[in-house]
Image (cartoon, rainbow, N blue to C red):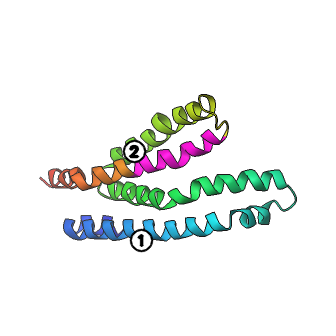
Amino acid sequence: SLVGQNIGAIKIKRAEKVAHLSSQIAFFGLTGMGLIMFLFAEQLTAFFIPHDPEVIQDASLFIKIMAPSFGLLGVQQVLNGVFNGAGFTKASMLISILNLWIIRFPLAYLLSHKTLIGYEGIWWSFPISNAIAAIVAFIYFKQGYWKLRLFKGRH
């Protein structure tokens, strides 16, 4: 909402600074959370499902696969918010479609059926697709097209 407020006040440079700062906070904060979850995956899982060693083992592995990507997922979400705040909802929609339908689902199938990792391939598709979507969102943000749309809308 800070980005949207600054855009509404036609303070584009300030909106861009807020977006950078928010992305950094999301990246480092969620990377730290991911590290904690990675280190305590078994305990976290056992808290919810205390008496099923197989579920604890599998769920812990999923957490350990996902946790390192939390920072990038945070960046993607922040930048999608920036695009939405700038009134360019099409960018966040396209990034979400790219993430889920174009990358994650096909990758989940390929990794789970065409490699030796089996069902874990489905899990690996999550952090891989999140990382790619975050990189795409970051590149798009840095290109600045979202700012040009703001100026076009003011005429």
What's the magenta region? 120-134
* Residue 65 in sight here: yes
Q: Nearer the viewer, residue 134 or 43?
A: 43
Q: Nearer the viewer, residue 96 or 3?
A: 96
State which mark lies toward you, 2 or 1: 1
Residue 95: which numbered mark, if any? 2
- Residue at x 40%, y 60% (from the top left corner): 78
* Residue 131 lies in the magenta stretch: yes
- Residue at x 42%, y 46% (from the top left corner): 132
Residue 12 quadrant? bottom left
* Residue 128 lies in the magenta stretch: yes
Q: Picture coordinates of residue 122 (x, y %)?
A: 61, 40
Q: Picture coordinates of residue 100 (x, y %)?
A: 50, 40
- Horizontal placement of 38 versus 103: left or right? right
Q: Nearer the viewer, residue 101 or 43?
A: 43
- Horizontal placement of 131 versus 59: left or right? left
Could you give the CA–CA distance between mark 2 and mark 1, rounded to whole angstroms? 21 Å
Q: Secondary structure at mark 2?
A: helix
Q: Picture coordinates of residue 116 (x, y %)?
A: 64, 34
Q: Secondary structure at mark 1?
A: helix
* Residue 10 in sight here: no
Q: Seen from this angle, which residue lies furthest front?
A: 116
Please tell me whether the stretch drawn in magenta is mainly helix, strand or loop. Answer: helix
Q: Seen from this angle, which residue lies furthest right?
A: 51
Residue 25: which numbered mark, if any? 1
Q: Label 2 is placed on what type of residue? A: Ile
- Residue at x 48%, y 44% (from the top left corner): 129
Q: Label 1 is placed on what type of residue? A: Ile
- Horizontal placement of 60 versus 124: left or right? right
